[in-house]
Amino acid sequence: MMNHPIFTDNDPQKETITLNLGPTHPATHGVFQNILEMDGERIVSGVSTIGYIHRAFEKIAEHRPFYQITPLTDRMNYCSSPINNMGWHMTVEKLLGIETPKRVDYLRVIVMELARISDHLICNGILGVDTGAFTGFLYLMEEREHIYEIYEEICGARLTTNIGRIGGFERDFNDIAFAKIKNFLIKFPPILKEFEVLFNRNRIFIERTSGVAPVDPETALNYSWSGPILRATGVDYDVRVNEPYSSYQDFDFDIPVGTSGDVYDRYIVRNEEMWQSLRIIEQALQKIEKEPKGVFHANVPEFYLPPKEEVYNNMEALIYHFKIVMGEIDTPKTEVYHAVEGGNGELGFYLVNDGGRSPYRLHFRRPSFINYQMYAPMSAGMLLSDAIINMSSLNVIAGELDA
């Protein structure tokens, strides 16, 4: 760090200053750093520094059975943990050739779309705070709490959910969970509408965000951007549509896109995506009504834990429980890649398997890590206050950045 040219430049005639934006600056919303060369309030150049919370998840995964990798995925994008969990489970299912029942797919879609809403609530709420408006953030955090209550009813957890299992879910959704989901579909839209009234046509907000950090489609694609920030540039790429998984092809929804790729467009795209997520959840609830009740996992006894009452009272069930948890089941020697549409873009899992109890290699394609690479170059020439809201609009989650 101390050998960086910014730190070693001792020229007494130098008229610029060095500013550390992070790793503990409140505006970074996470533990990562930008070393900025400033000419007054304007950024001349910058260097991004990552790795402050690197936890070696990929290396740890090489020593864990497939089931025990799920909690690692929780701690990447912890603003939408269920998408991480289910993306990993679907990767293992692809490896094993497991086909899940439609009802399982639709239940997964509900949870993943709730997670997407939760992720976008945080991003757009904090973007409002960074432009000086705190009220909207308070409105949206209350709604995120309602989503967490749904998680809690389904799996018992809230933030790091460990939700679902290879082949489906650990238990069926109960009546209380469905009631809370339906209640959310009624109560959330007026709140989201009120949030849009506060911001969408607010002159101060528009002047602070419109025209800030615009990115053209070619540059975004060259940097391998994905997710809402890519769609804000006008590219309608969405993994749910381009490479459907979990029966997303059964749903009717639109892909919101922007025109200029600036901070305002990113805000608008995320807001519209929340409306589309509500639309998808409503369809999923209708589709579930037509599926056989009580189906919540695929018929894969080699990878699905037997019921607890059987484990406590039956030797064979106890043996299977042990074999599944400890990874004593043979798996194919092959490699697979599976991607889902995470809150910030394409969340991919590249799994190389040698037939053992753990992956030979596992790589997480974290959208935050890829999206963030462009932050320092695009900040050059920008005012510091604009660079702050630019960072907010990228929604870089430190856990996903450093995995």
Image (cartoon, grey):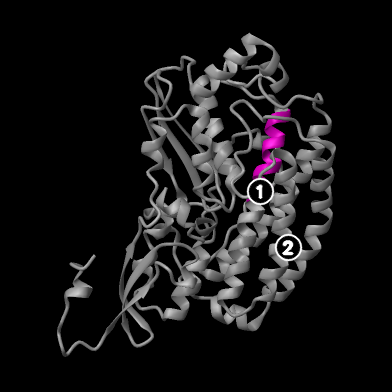
Residue of label 1: 158
Q: Quadrant of residue 169?
A: top right
Q: Quadrant of the N terminus?
A: bottom left
Label 1: state its secondary structure. loop
Whole-angstrom CA distance, mark 1 to mark 2, is 14 Å
- Residue 118 at x, y percent in the picture: 65, 55
Label 2: state its secondary structure. helix
With 55 as the anchor, is 122 left or right in this view?
right
Mark number, residue 142: 2
Q: Which residues are magenta?
A: 103-115
Q: Mark yes or no: residue 225 visible.
A: no
Name the amino acid type tagged 1.
Answer: Arg
Mark number, residue 391: none
Q: Is 146 placed above or below 92 here? A: below
Q: How many marks?
A: 2
Task: Give the mark nearest the N terminus, 1 or 2.
Answer: 2
- Residue 187 at x, y percent in the picture: 82, 58
Name the amino acid type tagged 2.
Answer: Glu
With 378 as the anchor, is 203 left or right in this view?
right
Q: Main secondary structure of the magenta part?
A: helix
22 or 336, which is in the foreground?
Answer: 22
Q: Say which residue appears at 44% left-offset and 30% top-offset.
A: 64
For the residues bearing labels 1 and 2, Cβ distance under 8 angstroms: no
